[in-house]
Image: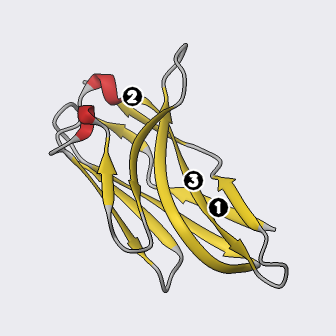
Amino acid sequence: QVQLVESGGGLVQPGGSLRLSCAASGSIFSINTMGWYRQAPGKQRELVAIITNYGSTNYADFVKGRFTISRDNAKKTVYLQMNSLKPEDTAVYFCNVDGLLGRTYDSFSSWGQGAQVTVSS
C-alpha cells in the first residue's frame, strides 16, 4: 500500500558527491521517521541517518560531517546528500519510512528498492 522509489545512486570518484532521493506514495495518513540504511557486500545492513517528523536527525559516526539527511514533507520525500565520499561508502543504500496508513490508521514501515552507490577511481 506504500511504495518507495529511490533515485540518485551511481558511480563517483573518491571525494565526490551524490544525492539520493526517496519518494513515498500510496495510502499514507502520516509519516513519522524517514531514514537511510546501507548494506555492503558480505555485511549486515546498517543505519546511516534518520530524520523525525520534527526534523531531528541522527547520524552514524562514520558519516557525521559528510552526509546530510533532509526531508520535504509536502512531497513525502527524504534526501541524503553525500559529500566527501570514500571507497568504504560503497554499498546499496535503502530508504525506510514509517508512519500511519490512510483509512485504517495502521502503522507501516516500508523499504525502498535500494540504490547502488559505488565510490571508486
Disc 1: which residue: 4
**Label 3 with label 1: CB-CB less than 8 Å:** no
Give x and y (percent) for residue 79. 40, 62
Which marked residue is nearer to the observer: mark 2 or mark 3?
A: 3
Q: Is residue 74 above or below residue 87?
A: below
* Residue 7 or residue 101, whichever sits in front: 101
Disc 2: which residue: 90
Crowding near pointer 2: few (<14 within 10 Å), some, many (20+)?
Answer: many
Give x and y (percent) for residue 16. 20, 41
Q: Give, as a three-letter code, the residue at label 2.
A: Thr
What residue is at 31 percent from the left and 22 percent from the top?
A: 88
Q: Give, as a three-letter code, the residue at label 3.
A: Asn
Q: Name the disc covering residue 20, or none.
A: none
Which marked residue is nearer to the observer: mark 1 or mark 2?
A: 1
What residue is at 38 percent from the left and 74 percent from the top?
A: 54
Q: Give, as a three-letter code, the residue at label 1.
A: Leu
Q: CA distance from mark 3 to mark 1?
A: 8 Å
Name the element at disc 3: strand
| First in sequence: mark 3 vs mark 1 | 1
Q: CA distance from mark 1 to mark 2?
A: 21 Å
Report whether residue 17 is seen: yes
Q: Name the disc covering residue 96, or none.
A: 3
What residue is at 33 percent from the left and 30 percent from the top?
A: 89
